[in-house]
Image (spheres, rainbow, N blue to C red):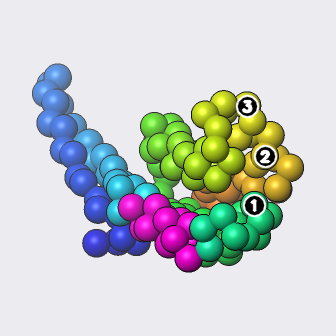
């Protein structure tokens, strides 16, 4: 297992006069989402409604988001996986603010300065690619 993500290798063999072997890696984020939910539910279990929303969001940023994003910056995730990670964070905010209105959730995320995982992973992936030496395949 790499980065607590299971990698599935899908091989496609096509024949059109030539034999082409395409290898596609797909990174599953299920374990990362489970760990995030476990950490977030632990925060709710310990603090309940005693702490303010600002404190809970700060704990989310410091403890839960690193669990969710751990080592995913090296994976070029597809749009569906990124939306799934965003949905996980959005559900946490829905639970925190007791709402199902996504506009309220986005407003609260903007006001608290929280960036969604899709935004964070996009910038981290670009930084990872810039840090990789160019002559790695030569």
Q: CA distance from mark 2 to mark 3?
A: 9 Å
Image height check: is 45 above or below 75? below
Q: CA distance from mark 3 to mark 1?
A: 17 Å
Residue shown at 51% from the left, 49% from the top: 88
Foreground pick, 101 / 6: 101
**Quick check: 98 left or right of 137?**
right
Q: Earlier in the sequence, mark 2 or mark 3?
A: 3
Of the numbered discs 2 and 1, the one sitting upstream in the chain is 1
Residue 17 location, x and y as percent?
A: 15, 25
Where, by quadrant of the figure, is residue 101 drawn? Answer: top right
**Mark 3 nearby-residue class (10 Å; few <14, some 14–19, many ≥20):** few
Vertical relation: 2 (above or below) 110: below
What crowding class fits label 1: few (fewer than 14 Cα within 10 Å), some (14-19), or many (20 or more)?
some
Q: Which residue position is annotated with label 1? A: 53
The percent coordinates of residue 64 (x first, y second) are 57, 69
Q: Which residue is mark 3?
A: 103
The residue carrying mark 2 is 108
- Indicate left or right for 72 with 55 as reference: left
Res. 74 in view: no
Q: Secondary structure at mark 3?
A: helix
Seen at 73% across and 70% down, the residue is 51
**Quadrant of the image occupied by residue 132:** bottom right
Reply above or below: 124 against 97. below
Farthest residue, direction top: 16
Query: Residue 67: x, y in percent?
Result: 52, 71
Residue 103 location in percent, x, y? 73, 31
On the question of residue 106 being in view, the answer is yes
* Magenta segment: 34-46
Residue at disc 1, secondary structure: helix
Q: Are circles 2 and 3 on residues that touch, CB within 8 Å?
A: no
């Amino acid at each position: 297992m790499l980065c607590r993500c299971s990698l599935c290798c899908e091989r496609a063999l096509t024949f059109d006069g030539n034999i082409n072997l395409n290898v596609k890696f797909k990174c599953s984020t299920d374990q990362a989402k489970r760990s995030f939910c476990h950490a977030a539910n632990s925060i709710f279990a310990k603090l309940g409604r005693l702490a303010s929303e600002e404190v809970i969001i700060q704990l989310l940023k410091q403890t839960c988001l690193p669990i969710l994003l751990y080592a995913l910056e090296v994976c070029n995730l597809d749009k569906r996986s990124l939306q799934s990670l965003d949905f996980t964070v959005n559900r946490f905010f829905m639970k925190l603010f007791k709402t199902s209105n996504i506009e309220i959730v986005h407003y609260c995320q903007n006001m608290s300065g929280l960036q969604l995982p899709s935004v964070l992973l996009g910038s981290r992936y670009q930084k990872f690619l810039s840090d990789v030496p160019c002559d790695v395949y030569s």
